[in-house]
Amino acid sequence: MTTYNSTTGRHDAPLDRELPQRLALLEELGLSELRPVPELDALATRFADAASALTGGQELTGIVNIITDVQFFAGLSTPRAARGHSTGRAGAPDTQRTMSRTEGWCVFVLDRRKAFPLNNVLDYPRSAGNGAMHKLGVKTYLGAPMIHQPTGIILGAACVIGRQETQWDRETVDLSKDFAQEAVAELVAQAPRRTLI
């Protein structure tokens, strides 16, 4: 449950009760040192493209967000305009991949433990003062939890964001859930060959 913080004039991020378990699982998966994963960049790009096709073709940004004491974009989509141009490495162009836990909406996906479609982020009262909305010009958000099925621990969220209001329908919400689970499968595939929790 989030609460309004009169000192900051913002709603605090929800309490993350799973953080110790998530950190232990990330350690077990060999992901305690957060780094970009080219396969997740590709997945985020496919997610953005698929969601865009279902919502009228607007440019969306796909993100695979692992949440610890910060949010880390292990997967980040490549904008359409940048595809085919050299970025110096495979995958998404270099960009900011970390965000405070007080910004964005993925922390609410963790708290809800289910998909979170926001047609217009301004319709969500806790968006007031949200840095992602102002810095990135985000107007719409759709995220789904990345649930590690053997443990039930949520590693983060797979999401798409856009700069115009979007009517998310059931098909697109289901798509977000599919991509979230595909992201978990890819994270597990990155793990060393050993018995996981």
Image: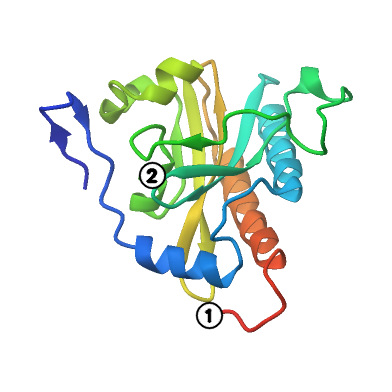
- Is 79 situated left or right of 145 in this image? right
- Please provide percent x and percent y for residue 175: 63, 45
Kind of residue sitting beneath label 2:
Val
- Is 100 situated left or right of 192 in this image? left
- Vertical order, 82 against 112 (above or below): above
Q: Look at mark 1 in the image and give the residue it sits on.
A: 197
Q: Look at mark 2 in the image and give the residue it sits on.
A: 107
The crowd level at tag 2 (other Cα within 10 Å; few <14, some 14-19, many 20+) is many
Q: Is residue 24 visible?
A: yes
| Secondary structure of the residue carrying numbered label 2 | helix
- Please provide percent x and percent y for residue 92: 73, 33
| Secondary structure of the residue carrying numbered label 1 | loop
Name the residue located 53 percent from the left edge and 68 percent from the top edge.
27
The crowd level at tag 1 (other Cα within 10 Å; few <14, some 14-19, many 20+) is few
Q: CA distance from mark 1 to mark 2?
A: 24 Å
- Please provide percent x and percent y for residue 37: 70, 49
Q: Is residue 120 visible?
A: no
* Residue 8 in which image quadrant: top left
Q: Earlier in the sequence, mark 1 or mark 2?
A: 2
